[in-house]
Amino acid sequence: MAEQKGLAQAIWLVVMLLVLALVGWATGPASALETVYDSGRSVPIAPYLAVPGNNPNNGQQDGTKYPITSTLRRGVLPQEVPVFDAHWLTHPLVVTGTDRHSMAWLLMHRQRLEDMNARVLVVEAHKAEQLAMAQSLVPQLPMWPRDDNWIEDRLRAAGARVYPLLIGTDGIARQILPLQRGVSSGGLR
């Protein structure tokens, strides 16, 4: 009787090992990511994942906690500053707060920013109503609150510690935009 019990346990153990081996064989090892094309100028995915896009619900973004604060400060950028590789941005990006100075800057450059299809990242807003007010001032510009420090970190590392400013698709941060219409925007677009 003991021999039959021992034999049954051995058979059960062998069957379980075979099942585990078959499951392992069927699922196989995890395959490596396939690189479709690599020009040697890879673009980090973090900024694309950090940007949720425009949500037209007047500042009531899902999960946004107020106040939105920044280590960047309202101020003057004395000169243009390279921030990103020229191929990283697909649209110009405005980095701004919701203070009077920033809103005046947005209004002053509104048409030019619309013409270049800029996006607006708000890095400083104390209440949802401030973001909603900013959106109402420039309704044609996609705008969202910052939910990640990546862009601010890049700006600080480049020496651009102020807002409002525009980062063109050329990767350069600037505050003074060309006002002439019909003139090539260079790398701004």
Image (tube, rainbow, N blue to C red):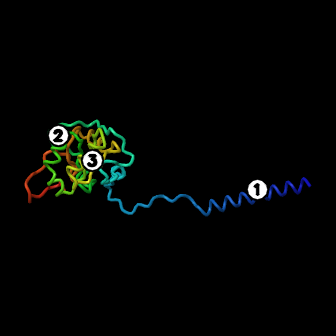
Q: Earlier in the sequence, mark 3 or mark 2?
A: 2
Crowd tier of the residue under label 3, counting other residues whose Cα lies within 10 Å: few below 14, some 14–19, many 20 or above? many
Callout 3 touching callout 1 (CB < 8 Å): no
Give above or below for 108 relative to 25.
above
Image depth: mark 1 or mark 2 in front: 2
Closer-to-camera residue (87/74): 74
Q: Earlier in the sequence, mark 1 or mark 2?
A: 1
Q: Which mark is residue 132?
A: 3
Q: Which residue is mark 1?
A: 13
**Residue at x 17% of width, y 40% of height:** 101
Q: Secondary structure at mark 2?
A: helix
Q: Identify which amino acid the numbered label 2 is placed on.
A: His
Query: Residue 8 appears in which quarter of the rendering?
Result: bottom right
Q: Which residue is mark 2?
A: 101
Closer-to-camera residue (18/96): 96
Query: Residue 130 appears in which quarter of the rendering?
Result: top left
Task: Please provide percent x and percent y for residue 148.
Answer: 35, 44
Task: Please provide percent x and percent y for residue 66.
Answer: 34, 39
